[in-house]
Amino acid sequence: MTHDQIYSRACTLIPGGVNSPVRAFNAVGGTPIFVTSGKGAEITLADGRTLIDCCCSWGAMILGHASPLVTEAVTKAAATGTTFGIATPGEVELAERLVAASPLLEKVRLVNSGTEAVMTAVRLARGVTGRDLILKCEGCYHGHSDSLLVSAGSGVLTAGDGTEVASAGVPAIIARDTLVIPYNDLAAAERAFAAHGARIAAVIVEPVAGNMGCVPPVEGYLKGLETLAHRAGALLICDEVINAFRFRYGLYSDAAGIEPDIITMGKVIGGGFPLAAIGAKAEIMDALAPHGKVYQAGTLSGNPVAVAAAIAVLDELRTRPPYAEMAAKVTRITDAFNAAATRIGVPMRIQSYQTVFTPFATDALPVRNLADAQAADTALYARFFHAMLARGIYLEPSAFEVNFISAAHTDTHVNTLISAMEDALTTL
């Protein structure tokens, strides 16, 4: 069956034919792909094609698809029960691993998604401080809860209507409690705190932004946010749903030398299952129910099958860390692409950070914020995306996302990717 046929059926049953807008091809045009299986760094489509996958379930599949370690762990767990709605020992074992991975974490709460983790972090910050305002950065995506769909990144940039609040159904009174500043602009943060500091509960930031493309922080930016927040009596929330365990075993915040008050984690730690977490020092986490007054709950939180997958992934990353090899592959891709784009004369450049990369349709690097990212030629990116798809490479179907290299990507995969990129550039 062709993708057009499947998509036509899907559109009669599912809004837009997809269960998450980022899976649609709105930003690049054409019919979305449908996957039937994956193994390692490759996916097989419903029409029989096999592609090298640089989406990796939006970063979750750091060990690649159908890792034997993970499939064995989840098969064993599922055989003993898939959910109980009652606490299990595995939840404690996973919490122990997360807490041991960072001195910033003394307690964690397991949830089901990054959106849920961030929603809880914001509520917790408000509950602890007794304040209402949240300060966020343009182009940073923190899930689809109401208060954070203001100047958000990721699929909101292509699915919204261009307004600051890019979703209908968000009451204006809620949006007013979210203040927005440009990413990497400490002066803007200083102005916001000067004007509203006594009312700001927290500033939330993706340490390495990944939802307006790959945009690393400039030196001193994150530490500056921390200083401003703490000086005003506010908290710093680092949204590491993408970052945590992506660049190193543990948190990006530790490597960056910053001390956020609350950290959210997801994707990698879920092992390919719906699992995320929120963590902080004990005095903050103890404000959560059942002992504290900040309510949060979830029937499937700490699901035993998801926990088993998470433990398997974290144990592999800790004992055999793949980070240096993954980063080296991204460096090869970045250098080869930028050299080819310069030689061929195409205004595209890759901006990368360790194990993630974005081909921006501009030669004006660095991209440091949302305005820079939006100045790139999205139509050119769409042409490049389809040129790569025709050559057996699946990149993110949006110019405002990051692509991922996993531990399963081999040198052969990288060579094929580089060759396809150079060939695609010649068609542009």
Image (tube, rainbow, N blue to C red):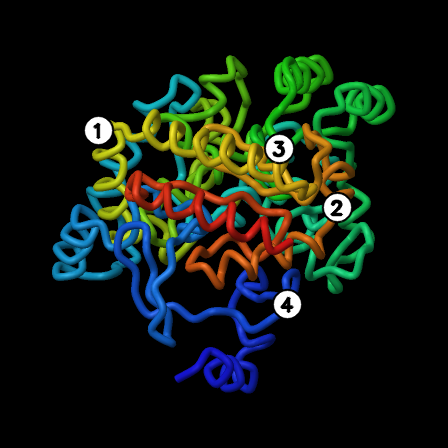
Amino acid at pointer 4: Gly
Residue nearest the viewer, comparing 294 with 21: 21
Task: Tell me if label 3 and label 1 are in contact, CB under 8 Å.
Answer: no
| Residue drawn at 67 percent across, 43 percent down | 346
Helix, strand or loop under label 4: loop
Viewer-nearest of discs 2 and 3: 3
Q: Which image quadrant is residue 182 in?
A: top right
Name the residue beneath numbered marker 4: 29
Name the residue beneath numbered marker 1: 320
Q: Residues within 10 Å of mark 2 (few under 14, many from 20)?
A: many
Q: Which image quadrant is residue 203 in?
A: top right
23 displayed left or right of 26? left
Viewer-nearest of discs 3 and 4: 4
79 displayed left or right of 183? left
> Which labelled disc corresponds to residue 215?
3
Amino acid at pointer 1: Arg
Viewer-nearest of discs 4 and 1: 4
Amino acid at pointer 3: Val
Give the distance between the C-alpha atoms of the residues marked 1 and 2, in whole angstroms: 39 Å
Q: Earlier in the sequence, mark 4 or mark 1?
A: 4
Image: 125 above or below 300: above
Residue 57 position, x and y percent, is 42, 53
Helix, strand or loop under label 3: loop
Amino acid at pointer 2: Ser
Give the distance between the C-alpha atoms of the residues marked 3 and 4, in whole angstroms: 25 Å
Name the residue beneath numbered marker 2: 151
Residue 30 position, x and y percent, is 60, 71
Q: Residues within 10 Å of mark 3 (few under 14, many from 20)?
A: many
333 displayed left or right of 374? left
